[in-house]
Image: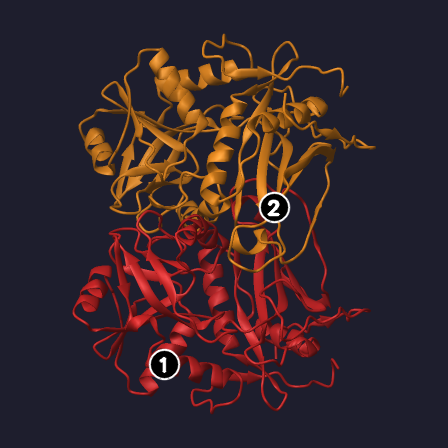
Chain colours: A red, B orange
Amino acid sequence: MADQSIRVEKSQSRKAKPDSNNLVFGRNFTDHMFVMDYTEGIGWHDPSIVPYQKLSLEPSSMIFHYGQSVFEGLKAFRTQDGDVQLFRPEKNIQRLNNSNERLVIPPIDEELGLEAIRQLVEIDKDWVPDAEGTSLYIRPFIISTEPYLGVSPSHHYKFIVIMSPVGSYYKEGINPVKIAVEDKYVRTVEGGTGEAKTGGNYAASLKAQEIVEKEGFSQVLWLDGVERKYIEEVGSMNVFFKISGEVVTPMLNGSILAGITRDSVIQLLKHWNVPVSERRVSMQEIYDAHQNGNLEEAFGSGTAAVISPIGELYWEGKHLVINEGKTGELSKKVYDTITGIQYGKLEDPLNWTLKVEKSSVNN
Amino acid sequence: MADQSIRVEKSQSRKAKPDSNNLVFGRNFTDHMFVMDYTEGIGWHDPSIVPYQKLSLEPSSMIFHYGQSVFEGLKAFRTQDGDVQLFRPEKNIQRLNNSNERLVIPPIDEELGLEAIRQLVEIDKDWVPDAEGTSLYIRPFIISTEPYLGVSPSHHYKFIVIMSPVGSYYKEGINPVKIAVEDKYVRTVEGGTGEAKTGGNYAASLKAQEIVEKEGFSQVLWLDGVERKYIEEVGSMNVFFKISGEVVTPMLNGSILAGITRDSVIQLLKHWNVPVSERRVSMQEIYDAHQNGNLEEAFGSGTAAVISPIGELYWEGKHLVINEGKTGELSKKVYDTITGIQYGKLEDPLNWTLKVEKSSVNN
């Protein structure tokens, strides 16, 4: 149990829930939210679940000026027998604190953070949709709220959790995407904020994404900011390649986000005795493997899509079609296994799920 | 005149003004603010000057998650004969639009932006303090406000201008500072967002700043993120070195902010026929010049301090004391001239100031 108990103020009215078969990502929110404040000298205080509501902030609040913020993303799933469960939520809380460290934001109590998410999901559990492939997306985030224009760490923060029911990422089945290797813009660099989940990394990515979308690609593949040779991420996902039977993924070097789905993929491959290695991967190596017929599969990994197969890579004027543009066998197996565990259809050999249980206090 | 006229709603009450001789930076704000909204399909609309007030935003507003935002900083000065004037405000509006371009934010009408600032200062001109070295700091900023968790450019924005009376940066005279050359963290890299004035760059800088402050330094000197050899900026200022009579400053390479004070310094030096060059400057070159006795002066330039002399540089275990830790002659002359022009004490040979004139409409 956490040190601080969570105050609960239930909403007097309930919003109409969107059609479970027609959900869009990130536009509808549940009836409640979690809020906790930080004040310098006091620490994190007053953890509360309150009716979903607007934030009222001074225009001088630091979040509007200097971007000191972090966030997380995870999901709650409805199992076939009606239970609700989370997927590795403790990893998200740990990563939130890692991001906090880089952004000079005071750490939260991890047990309290996890309990906040669990209780919030429990209170709004009727919002967890049950149509195939749907889930409840959970967004914890911390913003700097001190009303002050000096460039320095804020003395006030808000930790907030909001939730949004989301539809299946693959309504018409898994569809491999076309990706362009980015040669002008960089997402971040070693010594920067790349391994933190902070707004600035995403703001920096918008320009390149806008350009490649106009050219017909789904996402960019980011290269390292120093040599512009080594593969980092794809869009906002981690990336994997299967070459001659071995799976390779860029090692965590300080500029790559430590994806929780990435970690799950690696653990699963090891569990299956599929060779997997984390190391530097150059774009030239991927090109050569493709030319030699050894590039068997490629896919991105992330919370939203779980696995996103890559059907084509565009690099320096060359179109590399991978596995005839179709979803690879291993990609499909990883996808089916992770989602099977998430929805409680498969055994959970690595103990990744956490049931959100009924509590007599809050219901 | 701008296409759109600015609606003015005067505040019913006026706040007490802080003591002009005891002002702190960025904590007190004037009676009014400027607000203009952007809606996809409509464009920027409803430019308004309204009573200074809190912002009410959905917790899903994109600014809290993906950092899509830009800002500017400039000042209004009270001259000895009681007039109020701005210093090169059109450059700030131009740079705001350059930042917008990188952050995929729709550009504002520059004439309207300038008129918004002029009218806002005029309405709150009693807030422009008159004690020695004081000024009214003006903060235009744009935030992404669409309530949506997808990573994409926002369809809604707010352009806001707030103002804060600020004290003299040098209450006890100009004081040279000690600076540590940063060897672990980087601010940004070519292809990143370094030349844009966006929150993420400042959030990224906090960690290094926190560390060097504990070690007794005022600021960090940032090196390039690729080779970690070339000088970029100092804290949130541009940087100049005088070596054997010539002034050198890092060239704008995509990762360095195009400072308006930086540009003013360069123009002034040229006006005086002092040799000045914008080029790559390595830390080794600065070290060698110091060892040979040719490093005569060093200073940072920015809106807050105008000129901040560097008395000591700490690099790889070596302390380089510059000009015996005292303010250099040229540094002082540049400072005196720019502030002299800003406060109307000196001629304005380069036509940098803009008077905020009384208008019969708003008073």
The tag on residue A44 is none
Quadrant of residue B357 in the image?
top right
The tag on residue A267 is 1
Q: Amino acid at mark 2?
A: Glu
**Element under label 1?**
helix
Q: Is residue A119 visible?
A: yes
Q: Residues within 10 Å of mark 1 (few under 14, many from 20)?
A: some
Residue B23 lies left or right of residue B217; in this view the side is right
Q: Residues within 10 Å of mark 2 (few under 14, many from 20)?
A: few
Q: Residue at x 55, y 66 (%)?
A: A108
**Element under label 2?**
loop
Residue to which mark 2 is pinned: B40
The percent coordinates of residue B173 (x first, y second) are 48, 23
Q: Residue at x 50, y 74 (%)?
A: A172
Residue B53, placed above or below residue A75: above
What chain is tagged by disc 2? B
Q: Nearer the viewer, mark 2 or mark 1?
A: 2
Q: Residue at x 31, y 42 (%)?
A: B223
Residue B2, placed above or below residue A237: above
Residue A12 lies left or right of residue B115; in this view the side is right
Check the picture and name the quadrant holding the N terminus of chain B: top right
Q: Amino acid at mark 1?
A: Gln
Q: Are marks 2 and 1 in contact (CB under 8 Å)?
A: no
What chain is tagged by disc 1? A
The percent coordinates of residue A255 (x first, y second) are 35, 58
